[in-house]
Image: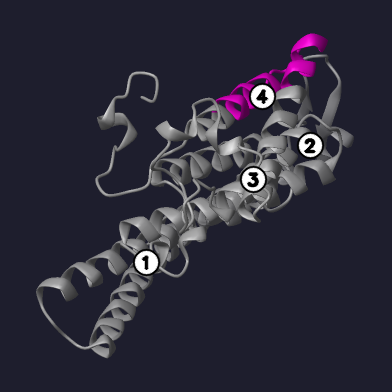
């Protein structure tokens, strides 16, 4: 988009800040590094390339963080001259600067990539915590732009990043958490037990329902004037009703699962009783002709 001066790609959403070229470069480096680290047995040279890319992402995040603090070394102008970057992720001021949340996001991404591939549970847990932080940053920024939060353009412009950048943070963070699904809090969510199944159903609902009802509340307040108290009451009532319906559906599904499980256990118990009381000798064995169980008649 920047090389070809394609405005439609530079501004995918009207009246929003743009993703800087250095941001796109950082994301490409992070994706390549993550792809190489996700290979089952990467070659040594590929592993080294992945680490170097991760260090590059971390370094860009640190430099952009320093730029936000006033120590600008020109990282936000890479790879184009400053004259071409007259718009983009910026502070209120003459210089094109990076949002604080963006710098934090790249630092988190770089550290998480450097931890990838290390053995043990603790690296996976730290990666998931870092990825969760990145996901929260991206979600906060996306919701802020969708809700048209005025503070993003007023007293808190340093908290805003381009919506495309925020969305990339969300997707990349989810990918890292899915890759480390056997560590930390993701271990419970990805479990095949009842707790994991409930979590996988409730998490999307917990994210989407408040977001959708909040957007509806804002949209209605722009067309139909009503008090903030009424809007908050209607918003909370809608969320409560939806969650009650979801909980009822989950309760019904769990009860149904428990009933089927109980029937299976009763059938196994009847088979065990028949196995013990039958007067004929019954011997169980595996494919290696090793006896695994015998009934009392066989013992006699």
Q: In this rendering, which labeled residue sits more in front, label 3 or label 4?
A: 3
Q: Are marks 1 and 2 in contact (CB under 8 Å)?
A: no
Q: Of marks 3 and 1, which one's residue comes earlier in the chain?
A: 3
| Most foreground residue, 3 or 272 | 3
| Most foreground residue, 231 or 282 | 231
Residue identified by numbered label 3: 72
Q: In this rendering, which labeled residue sits more in front, label 2 or label 3?
A: 3
Main SS, magenta residues: helix
In the image: residue 233, left or right of residue 162: left
Task: For mark 1, give the secondary structure.
Answer: helix
Q: Which mark is residue 281?
A: none
Residue 162 on image: x %, y %: 42, 46
Residue 143 within the segment the image draws in magenta: no
Give the residue at x 29% y 85%: 233
| Cα distance in 3D space between marks 3 and 1 | 39 Å
Residue identified by numbered label 2: 115
Q: Which residues lie in the magenta part? A: 28-50
Residue identified by numbered label 1: 210
Give the residue at x 72% y 46%: 277
Give the residue at x 78% y 21%: 286
């Amino acid at each position: 988009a920047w090389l070809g001066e394609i405005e439609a790609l530079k501004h995918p959403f009207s009246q929003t800040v743009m993703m800087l070229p250095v941001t796109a470069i950082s994301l490409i480096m992070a994706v390549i590094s993550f792809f190489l680290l996700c290979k089952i047995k990467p070659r040594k040279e590929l592993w080294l390339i992945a680490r170097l890319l991760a260090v590059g992402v971390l370094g860009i995040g640190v430099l952009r963080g320093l730029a936000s603090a006033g120590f600008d070394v020109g990282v936000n102008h890479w790879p184009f001259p400053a004259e071409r970057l007259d718009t983009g992720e910026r502070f209120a001021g003459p210089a094109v600067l990076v949002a604080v949340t963006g710098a934090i996001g790249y630092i988190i991404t770089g550290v998480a990539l450097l931890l990838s591939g290390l053995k043990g549970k603790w690296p996976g847990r730290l990666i998931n915590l870092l990825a969760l932080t990145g996901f929260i940053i991206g979600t906060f920024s996306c919701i802020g732009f969708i809700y048209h939060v005025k503070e993003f353009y007023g007293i808190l412009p340093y908290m805003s990043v381009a919506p495309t950048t925020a969305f990339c943070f969300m997707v990349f963070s989810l990918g890292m958490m899915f890759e480390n699904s056997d560590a930390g809090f993701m271990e419970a969510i990805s479990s095949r037990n009842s707790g994991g199944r409930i979590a996988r159903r409730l998490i999307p609902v917990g994210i989407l329902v408040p977001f959708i009802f909040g957007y509806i509340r804002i949209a209605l307040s722009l067309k139909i004037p009503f008090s903030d108290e009424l809007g908050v009451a209607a918003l909370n009532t809608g969320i409560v009703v939806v969650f009650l319906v979801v909980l009822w559906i989950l309760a019904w599904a769990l009860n149904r699962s428990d009933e089927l499980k109980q029937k299976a256990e009763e059938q196994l118990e009847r088979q065990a009783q028949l196995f013990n009381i039958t007067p004929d000798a019954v011997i169980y064995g595996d494919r290696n002709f090793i006896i695994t169980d015998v009934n009392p008649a066989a013992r006699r």
